[in-house]
Amino acid sequence: MMKTMRMFAAVPALVLLLAACGGGDGSSNGSATDGIRTIEITALDTLRFEPASVTVQAGETVRFVVTNAGQTVHDFFVGTEEEQMEHEREMQDMGDMGDMGHGDAQADTQALTLDPGETGELTMTFEEPGEVLYGCHQPGHYAGGMVGTITVE
């Protein structure tokens, strides 16, 4: 009888634990101790990201956990449209020189390059409302539509 009562007492705690782990839109609230929200992004060989768009709050710090689910190398670069275009030019120039890595300091804080099956993390704080993009700048990927939108409210 005592065993049965303990089991029933544990059920509400389990329900609360499972509810706290929810977040079916690919994001979670992050842990209460670090105050950082985690958003999971998947890079696909169909030249798409899933999800294709996310919404964050101004002043919010977000940890992007990006997984390359494809069979080719993919990038994840966060920036405005102008920064995306500048990064695209830099990547093309590096490709002409045989180096497809991210060579400048800005790219190191705003970009990941992921081999097939690899997962990486990028943490950023979005200070101003507006629109920011995430894109892949491997040859032909950005032009092929491998870009997503971050709406900062």
Image (tube, rainbow, N blue to C red):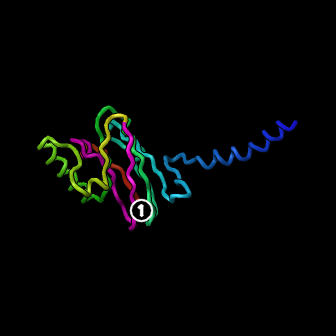
Residue 7 left/right relative to 117: right
What is the span of residues highlighted in magenta in the rendered image? 118-142
- Give whichever of 141, 90 is nearer the camera: 90
Total labels: the figure holds: 1
Q: Secondary structure at mark 1?
A: strand
Query: Residue 107: x and y, percent?
Result: 26, 54
**Direction top: furthest residue:** 71
Query: Residue 21: x and y, percent?
Result: 59, 47
Q: Residue at x 40, y 55 (%)?
A: 123
Q: Look at the image and say whether residue 136 sits in the magenta stretch.
A: yes
- Give whichever of 13, 136 is nearer the camera: 13
Quadrant of the frame with the C terminus:
bottom left
Q: Look at the image and say whether residue 73 sits in the magenta stretch.
A: no
Quadrant of the frame with the N terminus:
top right
Residue tagged 1: 152
Q: Residue at x 30, y 51 (%)?
A: 111
Q: Residue at x 24, y 42 (%)?
A: 138
Identify the image quadrant of residue 72: top left
Residue type at numbered disc 1 = Val
Query: Residue 139: x and y, percent?
Result: 21, 41
In the displayed structure, would residue 40 be above or below residue 106?
Answer: above
- How crowded pointer 1 is (Cα within 10 Å; few <14, some 14-19, many 20+) is rated as some
**Direction left: furthest residue:** 97
Q: Residue at x 31, y 55 (%)?
A: 110
In the displayed structure, would residue 122 be above or below residue 57?
Answer: above
**Direction right: furthest residue:** 1
